[in-house]
Amino acid sequence: MNLRHLEAFSAVMRAGSVSQAAKDMHLSQPAVSKLLADLEHAIGFALFLRSRGAALLPTPEAELFHQEVERSIVGVAALKRIAQDIRNLSTGTVRIAALPALAVSFLPAVVKRFQDRHPNVTIQIQTRSSSTVRQWVARQQFDFGLATPARDMEGLHSTTFLKCSGVCVLPPGHRLSSLETVTPHDLAGEAFISLALEDPTRRRVDRVFEDAGVERELLVETQYAMTVCAMVLEGVGCSILNPVTAATFAAHGLVLRPFTPRIVFEYSLITPKSRVASQASLNFIRIMTEMRDAFTERGAFDGAARD
């Protein structure tokens, strides 16, 4: 007994005759008759009373059996629709954990393009520090994450997603706004807002100024680049930041200038090693990569580079 047998039986019950059921199923009448005979043989009881010249009459057992068959066919049809929805990305959820530098300034545009193509897929984004993002993805709480690079962490696969050159961010009207490029010596004695010590870029920034023998006035340390941008806009000080976050605040008056020597800001795409990625999450990553490449080609990341 298979689904085709049950479909033939159900068609005959609905149509009241083998000939009409054959038309409905786009089969020949002998083919439907054989399906019925095979089904009766498989289940061990008669489904119809047959007499020459008389209408096909279902047995009481057929009436009972038909109720269960209809439930089964409806269930299979629902499963087919669900499978089609999954195949066509008409349903599902993509769970993303990301550090604020990309969650605030890059992912919104990716989400818009993804939902234009797959409007019925739900997106869940949680924004946390890179260390928390890595922990969550390692526990398989999220499909993938975006974070700063770190030493190998058990349960994670990590690849470089984006490298970009840091920029000097200045308050509106700052004396250095007229420079085409800012150097460490230009920032000597300037009030400076630093990323927190746990940020790997903080160490690279400090080393550049140490190598140049330049002292800054380190007034504030904070964990997130968007907080740095907000304080720079208020005139608290200046900083060296990734251009992805900084560019978002440029519309509010934040001044961005290239900084030399180059300080690289790097971000990794991390996925759980022991979890197979869904088609929805793979499509999101594909769109995310397309948009990164497009932004890089037109210089939106100000010197961004890919591996």
Image: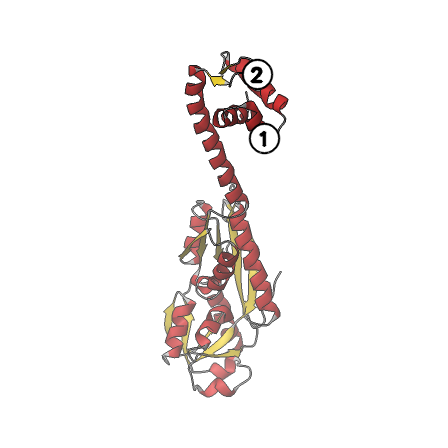
Which residue is painted at 61% across and 63% down in the image? 306
Q: Measured along the vertical axis of the image, is residue 129 above or below residue 78?
A: below
Q: CA distance from mark 2 to mark 1?
A: 18 Å
| Residue 110 or residue 244, whichever sits in front | 110
* N-terminal label among 2 and 1: 1
Which residue is painted at 59% across and 20% down in the image? 33
Q: Is residue 195 left or right of residue 178?
A: left
Amino acid carrying mark 1 in the image: Lys
Element on which disc 1 rests: helix
Label 1 belongs to which residue?
Answer: 23
Taking the image as drawn, is residue 111 in sight? Answer: yes
Taking the image as drawn, is residue 218 in sight? Answer: no
Q: Measured along the vertical axis of the image, is residue 192 above or below residue 155?
A: below
Q: Is residue 84 left or right of residue 221?
A: right
Counting from the top left corner in percent of width and height, residue 75 is at 45, 32
Amino acid carrying mark 2 in the image: Ala
Which residue is painted at 41% across and 58% down in the image? 129
Q: Measured along the vertical axis of the image, is residue 187 above or below residue 42?
A: below
Counting from the top left corner in percent of width and height, residue 132 is at 41, 53
Q: Quarter of the image holding residue 230? A: bottom left
Element on which disc 2 rests: helix
Q: Quarter of the image holding residue 259? A: bottom right
Identity of the residue furthest to the front in this view: 53
- Please tell me whether mark 2 or mark 1 is closer to you in this view: 1
Label 2 belongs to which residue?
Answer: 37
Which residue is painted at 52% across and 27% down in the image? 11
10 Å neighbourhood of mark 2: few (<14), some, or many (≥20)? some
